[in-house]
Image (tube, helix red, strand yellow):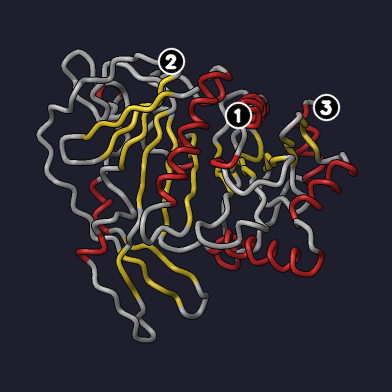
Amino acid sequence: MTYRQHHTLADGRDLFYYDLDPGSDRSATDQRELPETATSSQIRWDPLFQEWAVIAGHRQSRTYKPPVDLCPLCPSRDGKATEIPAPDYDVAVFENRFPSLATEAAEAVPTVGAFPFRSGPGTGRCEVVCFTSDHDTSFAQLSPRHARTVIDALADRTTELSRLPGVEYVFCFENRGEEIGVTLSHPHGQIYGYPFVPPRMLRAAEAAAAYRDEHSACLRCELLRQEVEAGDRVISRSEHWTALVPFAARWPYEARLIANRHVASLAELTDDERTDLAGSYLDLLRRFDRLFDTPTPYIAGWHQAPVRQYADSWHLGCEVFTIRRAAGKLKYLAGSESGAAVWINDITPENAAARLRGD
């Protein structure tokens, strides 16, 4: 069981502690003198490619690669005040001080509906998830019990953000490694509450809904069944979760961790499924770290159902991929990938799965 405590930071932002055990003292208050946060996020519609873009010019001043002793995600200790007032914590979640999306944007940015310059406020929510107070570790090094607490926190925040007016999609993710572009090295992830369904998730939702209408079945359930039957791209399998490399993988090493049961979001997982997920997810991340001599940079993101639609046909899964294709070599998104959105993969999914299995 995970224990939650709510606090408020000096500038009014929410802070939540998620503890492994009851009775943890998180009573320290934020003594910093912080100005109120001001955001001017805007979403703009591209009528040609049918996609929203987020414009957030205020983020240019966000914290960038601070030294370890000035890390804003470490606990407040030895007279150094950070984003987390307590001198210790298990898992902490707080509103981003430099958000791409914020509820306040609705008051500061007008809505324009006239073609072709359709735009509106970047209404939403951005939260930072600190996996541990230990600066010098990683998610893969957490204990299963601690990882379960992170999962509980993500599920809880998914539920809360889904209730916010205007939020259409909740995306939980982690960027790990400088090669990915991480500017804070403390082990952490993020949660975005978007005011629209991201294009990739929308395409997946529409495909799943169309398959359900035609076959009265779940598309991902069928894909999972056939992948398990084929076997050559399966990495591992537990009672509740299956890790595999997708047939049409885009990245050199890419894996999906899929719920064996048809379920739409993290919040809907049973207690047993969450516990099993902690072990399965840790196992997958550790397999990625064994690929090379140095820690593998990766992006991990949870594909959950949109907030207000497609829940019946959606099937929960997590995607983990690395931009590293070999020791000292990165997969760059060059002309075909960045310009045409056509990925060219240098490693076959079958070979990638074999390496992740340790064959």
**Label 3 residue SS:** loop
User: Foreground mark, 1 or 3?
Assistant: 1
Q: Relative to residue 220, is residue 107 drawn left or right? A: left
Q: Position of residue 274 (x, y in %)?
A: 60, 30
Residue depicted at x 68% and y 58%: 313
The location of residue 201, given as percent across then percent down, is: 58, 59
Give residue 218's mark: none
Residue 345 seen: yes
Q: Quadrant of residue 235?
A: top right
Q: How many C-alpha atoms fall within 10 Å of the one at disc 2: few (<14), some, or many (≥20)? A: few
Can you give x and y, in whole percent of width and height, for residue 132 in the image?
42, 22
Q: Which residue is mark 3?
A: 359
Marks 2 and 1, Cα distance to the nearest angstrom? 17 Å
Disc 2 marks which residue?
21
**Measured along the vertical axis of the image, is residue 17 above or below residue 211?**
above
- Image position of 208 (left or right of 22): right
If you read the primary sequence from the N terminus, does the residue marked by circle 2 or circle 1 appear first?
Answer: 2
Q: Residues within 10 Å of mark 1 (few under 14, many from 20)?
A: few
Q: Nearer the viewer, residue 338 or 80?
A: 80
Residue 347: quarter of image: top right
**What residue is pinned by disc 1?**
271
Residue 6 x %, y %? 30, 31
**Discs 1, 3 touching: Cβ within 8 Å:** no
Query: Do the residues bearing badges 2 and 3 touch, measured as CB atoms within 8 Å?
Result: no
Question: Disc 1 versus disc 3: distance between alpha carbons?
Answer: 32 Å
Which kind of residue does numbered mark 2 sit on? Asp
